[in-house]
Image: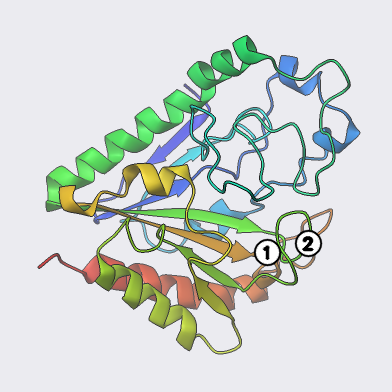
């Protein structure tokens, strides 16, 4: 499974990186239209943003793009946000609601199942293995699921998204102290806006693995791409100065999570 990248650290934290990949298998890429081939909905450079925040952090990343299959969606196809615009397990549109496939080349049920087995399941096998390993080391594990998105997408939400969007599925996926500590750091970060369980409450990964009673805590961080990119349009350039400023807050969050212990 060469498309799964794992770095093992010895802290309690596992970083999930489900949407940074830009690889598309040839057979899938051939069915995409020009909009789909642009890969606009990538969590651009999020792996780079988190790369230097600690060698003791475990990281699990898939190189496969979300247009092949979204590993942060329920494999059964259940919507994370019933009644709201969103994308599906194998997306048919981009975040603006535009079709990403050439007409007649959309994946059918058999193809979706094939992709789930080939690309979705291996990512979660790797992620689950690292959470279990970290749990065995510390008696608990903290999944920090790393995401980013454009700050303005009218198809998905009104207005401008806050800079830090912390999701814990309304407080169910982690110990309350973990949510409170993280939210407090975000709120205190000068020049940034933040929200807890706003438009993004945590994807399937956060909701599936976050089981505090079993010692597995999960938080999703959805960052506005305006906080670290020079622009939110092609060529999606990483802005080192913006990123460095943001990394100070992210490092503070992760260091606080690392020192936490269940009571």
Front residue of this view, candidates 174 and 24:
174
What x and y, as percent, mark residue 94? 77, 42
What residue is shown with label 1? 225
Q: Position of residue 10 (x, y in %)?
A: 23, 52
**Above/below status of 253 relative to 184:** above
Residue drawn at x 77%, y 46% as measured from the top left: 40
Q: Quadrant of residue 142?
A: bottom left
- Seen in the image, is 191 located left or right of residue 27? left
The way the protein has been coloured in the rendering is rainbow
* 116 to the left or right of 208: right
Residue displayed at 68% across by 46% down: 42
Residue 14 in view in this figure: yes
Foreground residue among 233 and 201: 201
Callout 2 secondary element: loop
Task: Say if 57 sits above or below 187 in the image.
Answer: above
The residues tagged by marks 2 and 1 sit, at their Cα atoms, a distance apart of 6 Å
- Which residue is painted at 53% across and 24% down in the image? 119
Residue 131 in percent (x, y) is at: 27, 42
Taking 108 as reference, is 262 left or right?
left
Can you say which quadrant of the picture contains the C terminus? bottom left
Residue farthest toward the front in the current orientation of the protein: 83
Residue 74 at x, y percent in the picture: 49, 34
Return the mark for residue 95.
none
Tally the numbered discs.
Answer: 2
Tell me if mark 1 has few (under 14), some (14-19) or many (20+) residues whose alpha carbon lies within 10 angstroms of its own: many
Asked whether residue 59 appears in the rendered view, the answer is no
* Nearer-N-terminus badge (2/1): 1
Q: Secondary structure under badge 1?
A: helix
CA neighbours of label 2 inside 10 A, class few (<14), some (14 to 19), many (20+):
many
Assess whether mark 1 and mark 2 are in contact (beta carbons under 8 angstroms).
yes
Q: Write down the residue under mark 2.
A: 232
């Amino acid at each position: 499974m060469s498309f799964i990248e794992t770095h093992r650290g010895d802290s309690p934290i596992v970083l999930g990186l489900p949407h940074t990949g830009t690889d598309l298998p040839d057979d899938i890429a051939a069915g995409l239209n020009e909009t789909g081939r642009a890969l606009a909905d990538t969590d651009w450079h999020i792996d780079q943003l988190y790369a230097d925040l600690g060698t003791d952090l475990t990281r699990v990343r898939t190189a496969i793009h979300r247009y092949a299959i979204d590993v942060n969606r329920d494999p059964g196809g259940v919507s994370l946000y019933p009644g709201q615009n969103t994308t599906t397990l194998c997306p048919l549109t981009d975040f603006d609601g535009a079709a990403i496939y050439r007409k007649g080349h959309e994946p059918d049920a058999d193809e979706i199942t094939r992709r789930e087995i080939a690309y979705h399941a291996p990512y979660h096998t790797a992620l689950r293995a690292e959470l279990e390993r970290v749990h065995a080391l510390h008696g608990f594990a903290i999944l920090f699921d790393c995401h980013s998105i454009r700050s303005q997408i009218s198809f998905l939400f009104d207005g401008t998204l806050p800079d830090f969007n912390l999701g814990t599925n309304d407080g169910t996926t982690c110990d309350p102290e973990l949510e409170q500590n993280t939210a407090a750091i975000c709120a205190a970060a000068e020049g940034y806006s933040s929200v807890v369980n706003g438009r993004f409450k945590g994807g399937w990964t956060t909701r599936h693995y976050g089981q505090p009673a079993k010692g597995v805590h999960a938080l999703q961080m959805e960052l506005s791409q305006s906080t670290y990119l020079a622009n939110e349009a092609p060529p999606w350039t990483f802005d080192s100065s913006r990123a460095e400023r943001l990394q100070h807050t992210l490092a503070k969050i992760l260091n606080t999570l690392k020192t936490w212990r269940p009571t």
